[in-house]
């Protein structure tokens, strides 16, 4: 201390100093700290701020991981949030730590009954009765167990014992009424018990709901309506009554009042995810999807802080491809609610709709790290990866999702789709067999197995599986379509068209069903009839951009590029990110003698979608058709940098390399890659066989093309290459036969002229 400086001490009174010491000691006392967290969590729970409550209970458990009261409150809160497994785990832990917590045992037992393990629930009931022989809740639990075991008479006796102990419990009277209905007692008795339950506790919605159902079955619709309204009045946050009332109105033929009921639910409970979605579900179920956008725009405007309403509104906008409108809504959600899986999924969906495939994949990969146990996140990641073309990541994500929720079929459907895309019929059949074993009545699994059989040229087995799928699900559109395609392949055109039209009656937007009808018309050389049929379908569903794409493809085939361009532009106006529509416009431009316009169109697309390897391959094809093989090769190589196993780029680049005398070994690797990706394609077989020809492996090349030519005898290139291969094996007669066929199929093409030259040299 410097000389001359005096030290000034702040003075404290002894009581004040003691107070500070006590406070400091209390803050360090773990028992005090955990209790404070517990009480804080209970306050949040009471105010229905469940997320905040779970944080506080978790904080209490950080202080003392064996704090039974915190485990119990956390379990109850999880259940209120709908997280059943998490709640169940916490209740198990509670009972383990505090076996005398009888209410925890009752809660756990009720969960076990609901989960299908009544014997475990009975253990909880017995433990409660051992401590408290007159515990009414234990007898009510045993009644529920007996009901689960299909023993209503025994259940009746148990709930009556519960009522003897506690005759004024509303829930017991409700249970008694339900059991009485099961045992065939007079409806009047059931109604009496339900009215007692309502009188004892009007705030309990269940007796109101059961009574409403009973009254409606008796024809007393007004009485049922009153019960629903009473339930809403006394328990305004319970959505079951609002949904029940809406359904009552729908059954009465009054959709307007049903809509108003659900709109009011969204208004009153704007912070509820379920309430926010119910109105949109109504619009979808009643065929009024077009009214949803305006309704939710109004709701969001009236409730600007409601995240749930904005989520539903964003979903509606994305379903209509209204990216410009959806962008600010989702940006606001990301800013204010970005920490939830649902918002991350919405953000990725917007990025996909905007053509930002890489960004969408990255968004979902981050979400998968943040929410590793989220089934929905894994599905969304798989979808983004699928659009990107990363089938490995998509498959891994679907597999993870399947482990998270083994009984959900969404992940299995994704895995089946990937197996189909990879032409991996054995894998597709295996997924189907496993699904059928676990779910014998699951129709799509029979479709997968049937598809695998059809791809392996086993129409009899495919037919049996498709028929089984249709038997299990008579309105199953994919099953009808698959059967229609089998008939088409067998040239049973009237049967094929009949099945396809049945599918279209069920689903007017089924492009695959419509294609069967159109193909039948084209097989019978009736393109005008096919075009008229397409126009007829467009009149039914004018907002389906895929129909305009199909029309454009048909018009391109009919050499009507002007019409095709107009149809494809209409598709693009409905969905600017429809790549098939861009392709149709480009084909039309090429037909009009302007390939450079087609290239410019695709280059603009590539600027917006820089990771689209398929688009680069299409530009390469156009350059190749112009005769600029150098540019074509450059584009194919760019595509392969983005997607090393892309079939089209690998196949065509290999062929161009042979044509220009480049490295045959590299061409072989490319051709083998293409063949792995499309093992049933005649084009990949043709290219690989031609590489074998250049490598001097004539017998291998011959074997490959001899099988291929059986299925595609009208392919001039295959006929020419097989003829050249036979000439190298010394089979001059077969060589001449196939070379003549190639020349006759396409006499004015380079292939036809090369075949003619080879024939002349042989003679």
Image (spheres, grey):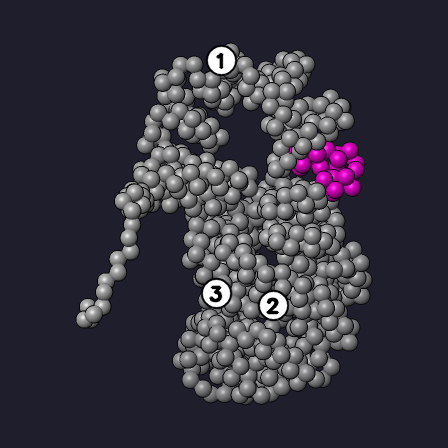
Residue toward you, 658 or 746:
658
Q: Earlier in the sequence, mark 2 or mark 1?
A: 1
Q: Contact, CB < 8 Å: mark 3 with mark 1?
A: no
Q: Secondary structure at mark 1?
A: helix
Task: Residue 675 in the image: state x and y as whole percent.
Answer: 48, 69
Element type where label 2 sits in the image: loop
Quadrant housing the N terminus: bottom left
Looking at the image, residue 87 sits to the left or right of residue 546; the answer is: left
Task: Indicate the position of residue 527 as horizontal and vertical percent values.
Answer: 77, 66
- Tell me, yes or no, whether the highlighted magenta stretch contains residue 247: yes
Residue 366 is left or right of residue 253, and the answer is left
Name which quarter of the figure residue 352 lies in: bottom right
Left or right of 68, for residue 757: right
Q: Nearer the viewer, residue 637 or 184?
A: 184
Residue 83 in view here: no
Q: In whole angstroms, how far apart are the C-alphas of marks 2 and 1? A: 64 Å
Considering only vertical position in the picture, is 341 above or below 167? Answer: below
CA distance separating discs 2 and 3: 15 Å
Instruction: Tell me the magenta residue range.
Output: 241-261
Disc assigned to residue 354: 2
Asked whether residue 101 is in view, the answer is: yes
Residue name at image x 48 percent, y 65 percent: 362
Nearest to N terminus: mark 3 or mark 1:
1
Residue 300 belongs to the span the image colors magenta: no
Q: Which residue is mark 3?
A: 362
Q: Does residue 718 sit above or below 490 in this rendering?
A: below
Eye-nearest disc, 2 or 1: 1
Nearest the camera: 300 or 697? 300
Residue name at image x 60 percent, y 20 percent: 200
Quadrant the C terminus occupies: bottom right
Q: Main secondary structure of the magenta part?
A: helix
Q: Give the residue number, with chain letter if any, for mark 1.
A: 165
């Amino acid at each position: 201390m410097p000389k001359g400086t005096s030290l000034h001490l702040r003075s404290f009174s002894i009581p004040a100093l003691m107070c500070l010491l006590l406070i400091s000691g209390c803050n360090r006392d773990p028992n005090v700290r955990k209790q404070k967290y517990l009480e804080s969590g209970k306050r949040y729970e009471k105010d229905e701020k469940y997320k905040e409550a779970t944080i506080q209970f978790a904080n209490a458990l950080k202080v003392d991981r064996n704090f039974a009261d915190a485990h119990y409150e956390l379990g109850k809160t999880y259940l209120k949030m709908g997280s059943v497994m998490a709640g169940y785990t916490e209740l198990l832990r509670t009972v383990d730590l505090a076996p005398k917590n009888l209410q925890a045992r009752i809660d756990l037992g009720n969960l076990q009954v609901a989960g299908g393990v009544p014997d475990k629930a009975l253990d909880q009931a017995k433990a409660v009765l051992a401590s408290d022989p007159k515990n009414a809740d234990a007898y009510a639990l045993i009644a529920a167990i007996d009901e689960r075991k299909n023993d209503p008479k025994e259940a009746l006796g148990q709930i009556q014992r519960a009522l003897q102990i506690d005759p004024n419990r509303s829930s017991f009277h409700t249970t008694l009424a339900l059991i009485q209905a099961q045992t065939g007692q007079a409806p009047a008795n059931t109604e009496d018990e339900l009215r007692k339950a309502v009188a004892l506790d009007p705030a309990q919605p269940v007796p109101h709901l059961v009574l409403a159902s009973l009254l409606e079955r008796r024809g007393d619709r007004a009485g049922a309506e009153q019960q629903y309204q009473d339930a809403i009045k006394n328990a305004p946050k319970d959505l079951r009554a609002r949904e029940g009332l809406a359904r009552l109105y729908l059954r009465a033929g009054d959709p307007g009042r049903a809509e108003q009921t659900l709109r009011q639910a969204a208004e009153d409970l704007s912070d509820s995810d379920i309430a926010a979605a119910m109105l949109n579900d109504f619009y979808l179920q009643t065929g009024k999807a077009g009214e949803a956008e305006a309704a939710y725009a109004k709701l969001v405007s009236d409730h600007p802080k409601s995240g749930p309403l904005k989520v539903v509104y964003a979903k509606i906008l994305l379903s209509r491809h209204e990216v410009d409108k959806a962008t600010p809504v989702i940006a606001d959600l990301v800013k204010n609610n970005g920490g939830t899986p649902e918002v991350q999924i919405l953000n990725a969906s917007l990025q996909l709709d905007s053509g930002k495939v890489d960004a969408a994949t990255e968004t979902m990969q981050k979400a998968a790290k943040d929410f590793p146990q989220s089934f929905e996140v894994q599905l969304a990641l798989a979808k983004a990866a699928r659009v990107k073309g990363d089938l490995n990541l998509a498959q891994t994500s679907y597999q993870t999702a399947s482990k998270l929720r083994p009984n959900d079929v969404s992940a299995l459907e994704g895995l089946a789709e990937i197996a189909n895309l990879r032409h991996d019929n054995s894998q597709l059949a295996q997924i189907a067999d496993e699904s059928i074993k676990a779910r014998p009545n699951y129709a799509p699994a029979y479709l997968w197995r049937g598809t695998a059989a059809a791809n392996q040229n086993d129409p009899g087995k495919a037919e049996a599986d498709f028929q089984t799928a249709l038997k299990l699900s008579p309105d199953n559109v994919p099953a009808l379509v698959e059967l229609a395609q089998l008939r088409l392949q067998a040239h049973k055109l009237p049967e094929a068209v009949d099945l396809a039209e049945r599918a279209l009656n069920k689903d007017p937007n089924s492009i695959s069903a419509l294609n069967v009808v159109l193909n039948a018309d084209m097989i019978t050389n009736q393109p005008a009839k096919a075009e008229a049929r397409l126009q007829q379908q467009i009149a039914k569903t004018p907002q389906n951009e895929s129909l305009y794409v199909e029309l454009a493809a048909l018009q391109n085939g009919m050499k009507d590029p002007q019409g095709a361009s107009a149809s494809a532009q209409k598709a693009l106006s409905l969905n600017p990110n429809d790549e098939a529509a861009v392709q149709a416009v480009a084909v039309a431009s090429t037909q009009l003698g302007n390939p450079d316009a087609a290239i410019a169109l695709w280059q603009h697309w590539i600027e917006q979608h820089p990771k689209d390897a398929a688009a680069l391959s299409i530009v390469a094809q156009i350059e190749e058709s112009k005769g600029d093989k150098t540019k074509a090769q450059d584009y194919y190589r760019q595509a392969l940098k983005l997607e090393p196993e892309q079939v089209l780029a690998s196949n065509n680049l290999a062929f161009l390399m042979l044509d220009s005398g480049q490295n045959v070994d590299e061409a072989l690797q490319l051709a083998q890659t293409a063949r792995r990706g499309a093992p049933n394609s005649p084009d990949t077989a043709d290219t690989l066989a031609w590489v074998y020809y250049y490598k001097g492996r004539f017998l291998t090349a011959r074997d490959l093309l001899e099988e291929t030519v059986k299925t595609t005898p009208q392919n001039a290139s295959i006929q020419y290459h097989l003829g050249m291969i036979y000439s190298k094996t010394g089979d001059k007669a077969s060589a001449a036969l196939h070379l003549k066929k190639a020349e006759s199929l396409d006499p004015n093409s380079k292939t036809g002229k090369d075949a003619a030259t080879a024939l002349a040299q042989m003679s």
